[in-house]
Image (spheres, rainbow, N blue to C red):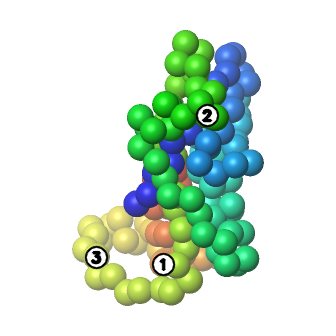
């Protein structure tokens, strides 16, 4: 999975992250975790928009290159570098055989049904949420 360097800044309940390698891509929230979650969603949306227009995403650079780039304007005294994963839909479903405890599978099926989702859609959504939360 590709990770882009994000620059986190903020205080109190106002936090933001910008991604220097993806101009105009940023997110925010009331906490660093919320800002990261918002930025992951924003990066995904930008990547999907680029793909539909046939525009290539800039390759993600290592932290050292981003921090050393004078255009980044990274101030390590007040900003923190974070890694932002790029989660892409490939628009091609694949089958995967997984093993789960029977009780867990029953709970998954019940919750998926309650939400009006298929088992696959529920598991994909749960996995995506977990990856985003982990940053």
Rendered position, 53 above or below 43: below
The mark nearer the N terminus, 1 or 2, is 2
Kind of element beneath mark 1: helix
Q: Residue at x 68, y 28 (%)?
A: 15
Q: Quadrant of the N terminus?
A: bottom left
The residue at the point 46 percent across, 48 percent down is: 61
Q: Which mark is residue 27?
A: none
Q: Position of residue 8 (x, y in %)?
A: 60, 30
Check disc 2 and report the residue beneath it.
72
Task: Tell me the mark number nearer the camera, choosing from 2 and 3.
Answer: 2
Count the marks: how many? 3
Question: For mark 3, what is the residue?
Answer: 98
Spatial separation of the CA atoms under disc 2 and disc 3: 43 Å
Q: From the viewer's perspective, is 5 left or right of 105?
A: right
Characterize the local packing of mark 1: few (<14), some (14-19) or many (20 or more) Cα atoms within 10 angstroms: some
Residue lying at the far front in this picture: please name it: 70
Closest to the observer: 44 or 125? Answer: 44
Q: Position of residue 67 (x, y in %)?
A: 50, 31
Q: Residue at x 59, y 30 (%)?
A: 70
Q: Residues within 10 Å of mark 2 (few under 14, many from 20)?
A: some
Q: Which is more toward the observer, 35 or 122? A: 35
**Measured Cα–Cα span from mark 3 to mark 1:** 11 Å
Asked if 35 appears above or below 3 in the picture, the reply is above
Q: Which residue is mark 1?
A: 120
Identify the residue shown where x is 61% and y is 42%.
20
Classify mark 3: residues with Cα within 10 Å, few (<14), some (14-19) or many (20+).
few
In-front residue for pair 21/2: 21
Q: Secondary structure at mark 2?
A: loop
Q: Are marks 3 and 1 in contact (CB under 8 Å)?
A: no
Q: Quadrant of the rendered structure where residue 52 is?
A: bottom right
Q: Quick one: label 3 or label 1, which is nearer the N terminus?
A: 3
Sequence-wise, which precedes: disc 2 or disc 3? Answer: 2
């Amino acid at each position: 999975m590709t990770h882009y360097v994000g620059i986190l800044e903020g205080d109190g309940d106002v936090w933001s992250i910008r991604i220097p390698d993806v101009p105009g891509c940023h997110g925010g929230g009331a906490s660093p975790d919320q800002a990261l979650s918002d930025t992951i969603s924003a990066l995904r949306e930008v990547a999907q928009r680029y793909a539909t227009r046939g525009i290539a995403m800039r390759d993600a650079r290592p932290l050292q290159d981003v921090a050393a780039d004078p255009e980044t304007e990274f101030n390590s005294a007040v900003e923190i570098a974070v890694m932002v994963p790029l989660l892409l839909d490939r628009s091609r479903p694949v089958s995967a055989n997984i093993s789960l405890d029977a009780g867990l599978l029953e709970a998954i099926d019940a919750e998926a049904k309650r939400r009006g989702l298929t088992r696959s859609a529920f598991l994909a959504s749960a996995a995506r949420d977990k990856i985003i939360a982990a940053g």
